Image: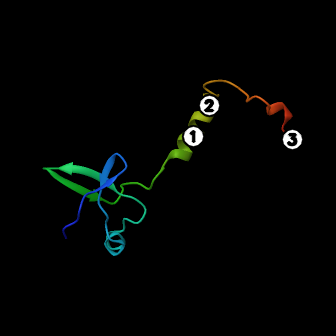
Amino acid sequence: MHVSIRPIGNSRGIVIPKPMLAQLGLEDGADLTVENGALVIRKPALPARAGWADAAKAVAMTDDDGLVMGEFANEGDEDLTW
């Protein structure tokens, strides 16, 4: 199938037909690589954000999850009712 490369903001892109994405199982995302001068699109090896919850728990257990900039407030925050 021949496709056009279209401008998308400062980048370029192609439109992959929905039936083709469904056939390949790529509805939720894909891994892109360049191999031997060809763009290769594959199913992601892992789901998006895989392992993030475990990594966050590990950081919290080391007590290294404090705010980088510390506490800060916006002008007028003291007037807000929660």
Cα distance in 3D space between marks 1 and 2: 8 Å
Chain-order first, disc 3 or disc 1: 1
**Which part of the image, by quadrant, shows the N terminus?**
bottom left
Residue 69 position, x and y percent, is 62, 24
For mark 3, what is the residue? 81
| Residue labelled with disc 2 | 65
Question: Is mark 1 in CB contact (under 8 Å) with mark 2?
Answer: yes
Q: Which residue is mark 1?
A: 56
Residue 17: x and y, percent? 32, 71
Task: Label 3, secondary structure: give it.
Answer: loop
| Residue at 56%, 46% in the rendered image | 53
Report the label total: 3
Q: CA distance from mark 3 to mark 1?
A: 31 Å
Q: Is residue 48 above or below residue 63?
A: below
Secondary structure under badge 2? Answer: loop
Q: Quadrant of residue 58?
A: top right
Q: Is residue 30 left or right of residue 38?
A: right
Q: Coloured how?
A: rainbow
Q: Quadrant of the C terminus?
A: top right
Q: Is 13 left or right of 56, judged from the image as shown?
A: left
Determine the residue positioned at 32% across, 48% down. Answer: 11
Nearest the camera: 40 or 57?
A: 40
Res. 4 image quadrant: bottom left
For badge 2, the amino acid type reads: Asp
Question: Could you tell me the amino acid type at mark 1?
Answer: Ala
Figure check: 61 above or below 46: above
* Mark closer to the chain start, 2 or 3: 2
Quick one: SS at disc 1?
A: helix
1 or 2: tag closer to the N-terminus: 1
- Crowding at mark 3 (Cα within 10 Å: few <14, some 14-19, many 20+): few
